[in-house]
Amino acid sequence: MGRLIRTLENRTALLFFLLAAALSAVTLGLCLLAQAHSAKQVQIQVCDRMLAAAGRLSQSTGASDEAIAAAFTKKGTDEAELGERVLSEHGFEAGTGRGFEYAYSKPVLPSVIAALAVLLCAAAGLCCFMHLFKQAKAVTGSAKKREKLLCELSDRELVLLADQVNGLIAERERTVKQMSDEKVRLAQYLQDFSHQIKTPAAGLTLNNEIYRTHPMSPEEMNSYLDRDRVCIERISKLCSESLKLARLQAGTVQYSIKKHSLSDIVQRACAPLYELAAKNGTELVEDIPQDAELDCDGLWLCEAVSNLAKNACEHTHGGKVTVSAKQTPLSTEITITDNGEGIADSDIPELFRRFYSKSNDTDPSAVGIGMSIAKHITEDMGGKMYIDSELGRGTRIRLEFLG
């Protein structure tokens, strides 16, 4: 009874039950109306036969009207045996039913049975609803508990609904884990960023204190101002590069992909690096086929190539850095090769860690984000980055784009 009450609390089941009850009442009423109509027709036909029989008796027997009327209206069955003897030769005998084709009794039982049949159908429908709602309750219960549904369901639509609920629960679990991981990464990022900015900020603070407490000549002041400029440039570069990397990691960069000349991209990437290469006594060479093209975002790919070429120039002294490209029917490759310091195998995984840079000791402007930015840009455009290096022999970085 409790399950039935809970089932009827659902609007669909309640409407179904009320409709079935109304249909049962309508069925009973229609049956009774049909029987009343049939009884009326039987009465009319029986009356017509009695009138016809009285007319024939009046014509053939010469009996008085009063006698004929008494024969049809007198109560009792005293003359039944006499009448049977008269009509027996024509097949009219007691118990045969002949002559009673229009006799009618008013049966209520068929109407009641028809109404009960409708109610039984309604009860069967309610049982189906109870089974359906039981399974639906299991699905909603799993969603409420945020646990995957493990029991088997018999209805296809509920199975599909359960699959969707399980998918949403799994997606929620992934999202929660991702948010938790993002919090950890954000905390680590803030820690790394504060560590990186602490040194130039401390330099600016110290210089400012010296300005206020120690008189100095213009030449000495210019020397301190040059140091301040280096600290400010490092802070500025650290902020801009960190923001750039954050946008790439968050996936908010909108790339404009179209066909670009690799020669133009490499020229723009290397243009600001010739002075750095010359400072280290390094030759910077571009070896790009003029007809080489690639579907990419030219500005961002130029950023990636520039970062990689800059790292090569910083770690190559008196050697050679070559930026080359090769195109086949299957792929396009951009390669940055140098014969500089090289990288130990244990250090290669660290290259893509934020703020990791081997140039910090020799180049105060290095912030250690360029490799991470280049890797993100390459992978966002569907490419892969490969690094081969040997200490004292040099490094080869290859960007491969299929298609």
Image (cartoon, grey):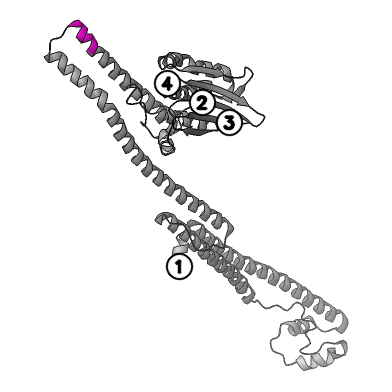
- Give the residue at mark 1: 3
Residue type marked 1:
Arg
Q: Position of residue 310 (x, y in %)?
A: 44, 22
- Start and end of the magenta stretch? 215-223
Q: Which mark is residue 337?
A: 2
> Residues under labels 4 and 3: Cα distance?
30 Å
- Give the residue at mark 3: 401
Q: Secondary structure at mark 4?
A: loop
> Residues under labels 2 and 3: Cα distance?
18 Å
**Which numbered disc, 2 or 4, marks the residue that appears first in the sequence?**
4
Q: Nearer the viewer, mark 1 or mark 4?
A: 4
Q: On the rendered image, what quadrant is the N terminus found in?
A: bottom left
Disc 4 residue crowd, few under 14, some 14–19, many 20+, Cα 10 Å: many
Q: Nearer the viewer, mark 2 or mark 4?
A: 4
Pointer 3 and pointer 1: residues touching (CB < 8 Å)?
no
Q: Nearer the viewer, residue 38 or 306?
A: 306
Q: Position of residue 95 (x, y in %)?
A: 76, 89
